[in-house]
C-alpha cells in the first residue's frame, strides 16, 4: 500500500511542475506581447510627432 502513496505523490509533483512551467511560460508570453505592444505604441507616437 505504501507504493500507491508514493506514486500519487510523484504524479502530484509532476502535475505541480507542469503547472508551474505552464504558468511561467504563459506569463513570459504575456510580457513579450506587452513589450511588443508598448514598442509599437511608442513608435507610432514618434511618427505622429515627427
Image (cartoon, rainbow, N blue to C red):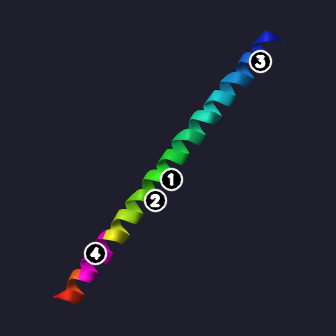
Say which residue appears at 23% left-offset and 89% top-offset: 48
* Residue identifier under label 3: 5
Q: Nearer the viewer, mark 3 or mark 1?
A: 1
Quarter of the image for the N terminus: give it. Answer: top right
The image position of residue 16, as x and y in percent, is 62, 34
Tell me the CA gap for discs 2 and 4: 18 Å
What span is colored magenta in the figure? 39-45
Q: CA distance from mark 2 to mark 3?
A: 37 Å
| The stretch drawn in magenta includes residue 38 | no
Q: Secondary structure at mark 3?
A: helix
Q: Is residue 35 above or below residue 4?
A: below
Cβ–Cβ under 8 Å for marks 2 and 1: yes
Q: Which residue is mark 2?
A: 30
Distance from disc 4 to disc 1, alpha carbons, whole Å, reads 24 Å
The nearer-to-camera label among 4 and 1 is 4
Pointer 1: residues within 10 angstroms few (<14), some, or many (20+)? Answer: few
Tag 1 or tag 3, which sits nearer the N-term?
3
Dot in front, 2 or 4: 4
Does label 4 or label 3 sit earlier along the sequence? 3
User: Is 1 left or right of 45, judged from the image as shown?
Assistant: right
Q: Nearer the viewer, residue 24 or 1?
A: 24
Q: What is the number of the mark on residue 42?
A: 4
How many numbered circles are shown?
4
The span from disc 3 to disc 1 (Cα, nearest Å) is 31 Å
Which element is circle 2 on?
helix
Against 10, residue 2 (above or below) is above
Mark number, residue 26: 1
State which tag comes first along the sequence, 4 or 1: 1
> 25 left or right of 42?
right
Amino acid at each position: 500500500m505504501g507504493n500507491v502513496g508514493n506514486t500519487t505523490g510523484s504524479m502530484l509533483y509532476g502535475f505541480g511542475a507542469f503547472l508551474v512551467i505552464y504558468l511561467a511560460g504563459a506569463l513570459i508570453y504575456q510580457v513579450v506581447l506587452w513589450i511588443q505592444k508598448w514598442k509599437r505604441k511608442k513608435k507610432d507616437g514618434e511618427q505622429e510627432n515627427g
